[in-house]
């Protein structure tokens, strides 16, 4: 039998290779985990965690992809900050111009004109527009609405929404209007007809709605507050809040109008 020499190597891989392989596997898993976190993709990250747990002998039921809420991949349109500020300044300038026409010193609460997210909102107390329990416009109310119509006609391709509001007091028994819903509806409709017939506003721009007593501006705890809650609000809808006026009414020769998102900018330039 030949004598084994001292410099003969043992058969198979060296013993340190097992430890080295384990270390490489752990490093690979670690860097895959870091990569998943760095891409900020929730689904892939959770899938990687599940794979690691499965490799370590655990069942990844919690991280199963069937339980992962899909992420939205649709791009979100964000209005540039500078443009948003410019539009806001324009709305404030238009609101101030309309407020100067409408508001006397003693009417500061009963006539409110303000720039809001939707556009420009005119809020006029029912005491100015109507007699108690009536949907017939007063002479003072008609004069106020004519001033509003001037501003609305400056933007003749934007929609106008008219909202009728009441307080929480019930309509007197025997009234033909029946209840607060119908009273608010009748008053909003009366304003719509006035805008169409005397304000020069095209009817395809107009819509109205009844809010009844359910959207008060003030608590209905005093007679003064209830009077202020009995109001009509006219909203000039701006930008993406306004539908594009398209198509033609039967018998109408007016062309379709495309909506321009810079509706308010010419007015702020004229103000300056």
Image (spheres, rainbow, N blue to C red):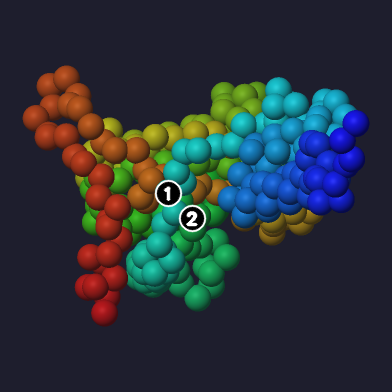
Looking at the rendered structure, which numbered label has been put on residue 117?
2
Is residue 107 visible in the rendered structure shown here? yes
Q: Position of residue 117 (x, y in %)?
A: 48, 55
Position in image of residue 159 (x %, y %): 34, 42
Instruction: Please tell me the numbered disc located at residue 174.
Output: none
Quadrant placement of the C terminus: bottom left
The crowd level at tag 2 (other Cα within 10 Å; few <14, some 14-19, many 20+) is few
User: Foreground: 67 or 103?
Assistant: 67
The x and y percentages for residue 37 are 67, 51
From this view, report whether residue 186 is shown above or below residue 219: above
Q: Residue lying farthest bottom?
A: 272
Dot placed on the residue nearer the N-terminal end, 2 or 1: 1
In the image, residue 218 above or below residue 10: below
At x 87% / y 35%, what residue is drawn? Answer: 2
Residue 72, percent from left and from top = 55, 37
Instruction: Label 1: state its secondary structure.
Output: loop
Of labels 2 and 1, the one closer to you: 1
Is there any visible trace of residue 133 in the rendered image? no
For label 1, the residue is 77
Q: Quadrant of residue 245?
A: top left
């Amino acid at each position: 039998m030949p004598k084994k020499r001292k410099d003969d190597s043992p058969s198979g891989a060296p013993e340190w290779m097992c430890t080295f392989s384990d270390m490489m596997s752990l490093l690979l898993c670690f860097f895959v985990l870091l990569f998943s976190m760095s891409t900020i993709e929730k689904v892939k990250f959770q899938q990687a965690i599940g794979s690691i747990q499965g490799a370590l002998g655990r069942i990844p039921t919690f991280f199963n992809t069937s339980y992962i809420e899909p992420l939205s991949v649709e791009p979100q349109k964000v209005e540039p900050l500078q443009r948003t500020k410019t539009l806001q300044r324009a709305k404030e300038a238009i609101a101030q111009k309309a407020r100067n026409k409408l508001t006397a010193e003693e009417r500061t609460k009963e006539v409110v004109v303000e720039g809001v997210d939707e556009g420009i909102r005119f809020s006029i107390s029912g005491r100015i527009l109507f007699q108690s329990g009536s949907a017939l416009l007063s002479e003072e109310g008609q004069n106020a609405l004519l001033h509003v119509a001037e501003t609305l006609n400056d933007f003749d391709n934007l929609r106008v929404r008219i909202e009728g509001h009441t307080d929480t007091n019930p309509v007197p028994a025997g009234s033909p209007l029946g209840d607060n819903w119908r009273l608010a509806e009748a008053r909003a409709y009366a304003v719509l007809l006035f805008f169409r017939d005397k304000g020069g506003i095209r009817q395809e721009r107009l819509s109205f709605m009844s809010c009844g007593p359910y959207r008060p501006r003030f608590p209905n705890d005093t007679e003064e507050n209830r009077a202020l809650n009995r109001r009509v609000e006219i909203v000039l809808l701006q930008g993406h809040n306004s539908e594009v006026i398209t198509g033609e009414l039967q018998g109408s020769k007016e062309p379709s109008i495309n909506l321009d998102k810079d509706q308010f900018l010419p007015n702020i330039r004229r103000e300056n």
